[in-house]
Image: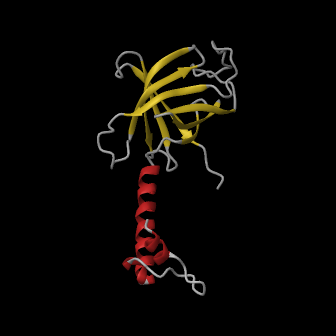
């Protein structure tokens, strides 16, 4: 910026408005209207994509753990933030005997989840693929992840874990933790 341009943008000692204004800001109603339109469009975009956004806190299918799904590098990961119980995923749901003896708190259960169709940056992704760790047997599985609002308005995290082909897998439904806002 030249010295003259800087002086033109300088404020007059008795005035708080710059000498030079941009055409869109000369009429306050126009600037307010543009800001309102932008905010409305942004809120609509955030609302439509938040329903399918897996980021946030979820309670696992058996109700044992609260897991936070958040970015980790270029991917999404899920880390245990709270231990709620110790029930087995096996039929009958007795006490779980974990093959992995490490404490669950802080453990990463979901890792390297990347969008399946990231070709169109204007469209938010609706499905991710990565890996899910099962503490009960100590195994890592391939996994597809999506969010469904069909059964629950707050959303359910659909996790389809499999070995080899997705056709031979099992789907878990995790429930979103209610926000305290």
Q: Where is residue 100 in the image (x, y as percent from the top left)?
A: 64, 14
Q: How is the image coloured?
A: secondary structure
Residue 36 in view, yes or no:
no
Which sits in the foreground, 91 or 143?
Answer: 143
Position of the N terminus by quadrant: bottom left
Q: Where is residue 49 in the image (x, y as percent from the top left)?
A: 42, 50
Q: Which residue is drawn at 66% across and 18% down?
A: 96
Where is 19 relative to 156, above or below? below
Q: Which residue lies furthest to the left in this view?
A: 119
Where is 8 relative to 83, above or below? below
Q: Residue at x 57, y 19 (%)?
A: 90
Left or right of residue 64, residue 145 in this image: left
Q: Position of residue 143 (x, y in %)?
A: 43, 25
Left or right of residue 90, residue 150 in this image: left
Which sits in the foreground, 116 or 24?
Answer: 24
User: How many labels sit on residues?
Assistant: 0
Q: Residue furthest front?
A: 3
Left or right of residue 151, residue 87 in this image: right
Q: Residue at x 70, y 21 (%)?
A: 103
Q: Residue at x 38, y 37 (%)?
A: 127
Based on the displayed image, in which of its 4 quarters is residue 85 positioned? top right
Where is 167 relative to 116, above or below? above
Residue 25 in view, yes or no:
yes
Based on the displayed image, in which of its 4 quarters is residue 114 positioned? top left
Q: Which residue lies furthest to the bottom in this view?
A: 14
Position of the C terminus by quadrant: bottom right
């Amino acid at each position: 910026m030249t010295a003259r341009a800087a002086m033109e943008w300088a404020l007059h000692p008795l005035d708080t408005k710059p000498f030079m204004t941009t055409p869109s800001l000369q009429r306050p109603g126009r600037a307010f209207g543009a800001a309102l339109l932008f905010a409305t469009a942004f809120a609509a975009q955030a609302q439509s994509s938040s329903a399918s956004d897996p980021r946030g806190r979820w309670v696992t299918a058996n109700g044992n753990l609260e897991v936070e799904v958040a970015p980790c590098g270029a991917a999404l990961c899920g880390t245990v933030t709270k231990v709620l119980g110790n029930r087995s995923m096996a039929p009958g749901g007795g006490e779980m005997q974990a093959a992995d003896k490490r404490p669950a708190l802080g453990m990463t259960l979901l890792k390297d989840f990347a969008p399946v169709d990231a070709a169109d940056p204007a469209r938010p992704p609706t499905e991710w693929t990565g890996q899910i760790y099962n503490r009960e047997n100590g195994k890592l599985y391939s996994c597809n992840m999506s969010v469904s609002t069909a059964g629950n308005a707050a959303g359910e995290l659909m996790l389809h874990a499999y070995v080899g082909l997705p056709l031979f897998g099992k789907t878990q439904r995790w429930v979103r933790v209610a926000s305290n806002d």
